[in-house]
Image: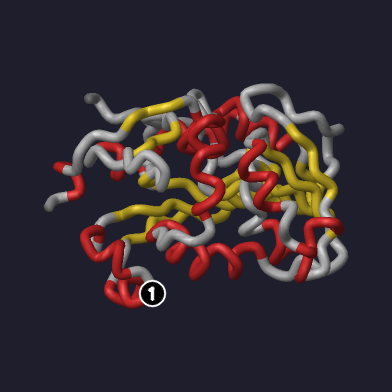
């Protein structure tokens, strides 16, 4: 079956969806996570002794490696189910946790963190430029913001974050936003941030060996990574046009 022809999922509010997904989230094969775990850590680098905030931390999948790496970690999320799962991890006691809805301004002072990370969150945020601006605001001038995002090509093919509810057997999709690449780039530029890394990643044969579930996505661009620093690009590069469709 072509992934674009899969049965439609029941779309629920984002928080409800992740509350329901939490119990099985870390146990599922996730093609996006497989690729992200290959490419994200090298862009993040050494975090020993630095202040890091994990925005949209979920079950702590990305938070706990920060703790193990020696960072001083703050984690932010609003899903009770996800946080309940995260709290089962022994290292979680070393994390400062803040419950917060990312549609609201972040509850931190400017320049609070050396690293600001957000993994597979922005595709759930309409008008992501506002949140990107907040991420830049709380990042120190010599630090950076590192983002992983489900590639907009997935939405164009009718695929978004979703899971099979083990209780009901119904496919559930936490509400996503039909953002385009231009929305993310323009959001960064409008916030006065410089894009020092941008990459798109296709699911490949190597990834499929670790995630057979993702074989149907081989050749698709499914993941985007952006690393942002303080400082604008030249004026001629300050805006990217949205696709005319």
220 to 133, vertically: above or below: below
Percent coordinates x, y for residue 167 in the rendering? 42, 43
Q: Horizontal placement of 55 versus 138: left or right?
A: left
Q: Which residue is mark 1?
A: 210
Question: Observer-nearest residue: 229 or 203?
Answer: 203
Residue drawn at (87%, 65%), measured in percent from left and top? 49
Q: Residue furthest front?
A: 167
Colour scheme shown: secondary structure
Q: Quadrant of residue 4?
A: top left
Percent coordinates x, y for residue 143 in the rendering? 75, 52
225 to 15, vertically: above or below: below
32 to 204, vertically: above or below: above
Residue drawn at (46%, 37%), measured in percent from left and top? 123
Q: Count numbered badges in the picture.
A: 1
Q: Horizontal placement of 144 versus 185: left or right?
A: right
Q: Quick check: can you spot residue 236?
A: no
Residue drawn at (47%, 46%), measured in percent from left and top? 149
- Mark 1 secondary-structure assignment: helix
Percent coordinates x, y for residue 178 in the rendering? 37, 29
Q: Quick check: can you spot residue 101?
A: yes
Q: Horizontal placement of 98 versus 42: left or right?
A: right
Q: Quadrant of residue 134?
A: top right
């Amino acid at each position: 079956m072509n992934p674009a022809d899969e049965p439609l999922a029941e779309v629920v509010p984002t928080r409800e969806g992740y509350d329901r997904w939490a119990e099985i989230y870390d146990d599922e094969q996730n093609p996006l996570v497989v690729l992200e775990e290959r490419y994200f850590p090298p862009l993040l680098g050494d975090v020993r002794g630095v202040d890091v905030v994990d925005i949209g931390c979920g079950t702590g999948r990305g938070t706990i490696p920060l703790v193990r790496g020696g960072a001083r970690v703050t984690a932010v999320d609003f899903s009770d189910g996800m946080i309940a799962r995260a709290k089962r991890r022994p290292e979680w006691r070393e994390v400062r946790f803040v419950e917060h809805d990312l549609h609201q301004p972040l509850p931190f002072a400017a320049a609070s963190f050396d690293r600001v990370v957000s993994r597979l969150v922005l595709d759930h945020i309409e008008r992501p430029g506002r949140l990107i601006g907040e991420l830049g605001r709380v990042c120190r001038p010599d630090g950076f913001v590192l983002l992983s995002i489900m590639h907009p090509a997935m939405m164009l093919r009718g695929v978004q974050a979703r899971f099979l509810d083990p209780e009901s057997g119904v496919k559930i999709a936490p509400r996503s936003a039909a953002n385009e690449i231009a929305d993310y780039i323009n959001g960064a530029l409008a916030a006065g941030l410089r894009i020092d890394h941008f990459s798109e990643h296709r699911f490949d044969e190597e990834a499929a060996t670790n995630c057979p579930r993702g074989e149907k996505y081989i050749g698709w661009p499914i993941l985007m990574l952006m690393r942002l620093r303080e400082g604008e690009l030249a004026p001629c590069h300050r805006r990217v046009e949205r696709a005319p469709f």
